[in-house]
Amino acid sequence: MEETDLQLIRKLIPKDKELKRLWDEHLDYEEKLDQLNKRRYLSTEEEMRRKEIQKLKLHGKDRIEEILRRYRDEQ
């Protein structure tokens, strides 16, 4: 994410509960993916979980971008 997006997120989190929830989930998914990606080998179940987390993270990021776009349009 770009620095301007991160600044806007930090500014809006106290005002927007959905954005805060999505951002917290995004950070959690990032941490989980980092842990999985550090492993040299993944079991089939771990690989499926990694792909699921990637999809959830991407969906959340898309929603975050929608919220940011809405706030930018209002200004």
Image (cartoon, helix red, strand yellow):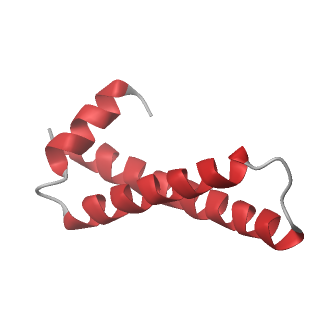
Q: Confirm whether residue 73 shows in the render.
A: no
Q: At which x and y percent is residue 14?
A: 12, 55
Q: At which x and y percent is residue 50?
A: 71, 61
Q: In which quadrant is the C terminus drawn? A: top left
Q: In this rendering, would 68 be left or right of 30? A: left
Q: At which x and y percent is residue 56?
A: 58, 64
Q: Farthest residue to the left: give it.
A: 15
Q: Residue, x 62% and y 52% (percent of image)?
A: 35
Instruction: Say if 64 sits above or below 1 in the image.
Output: below
Q: In this rendering, would 17 be left or right of 61? A: left
Quadrant of residue 23 within the rendered picture: bottom left
Q: Confirm whether residue 15 shows in the render.
A: yes
Instruction: Say if 58 sits above or below 8 in the image.
Output: below
Q: Residue, x 76% and y 50% (percent of image)?
A: 39
Instruction: Say if 75 sits above or below 34 in the image.
Output: above
Instruction: Say if 63 sits above or below 65 in the image.
Output: below
Q: In this rendering, would 68 be left or right of 12? A: right
Q: Residue, x 52% and y 51% (percent of image)?
A: 30
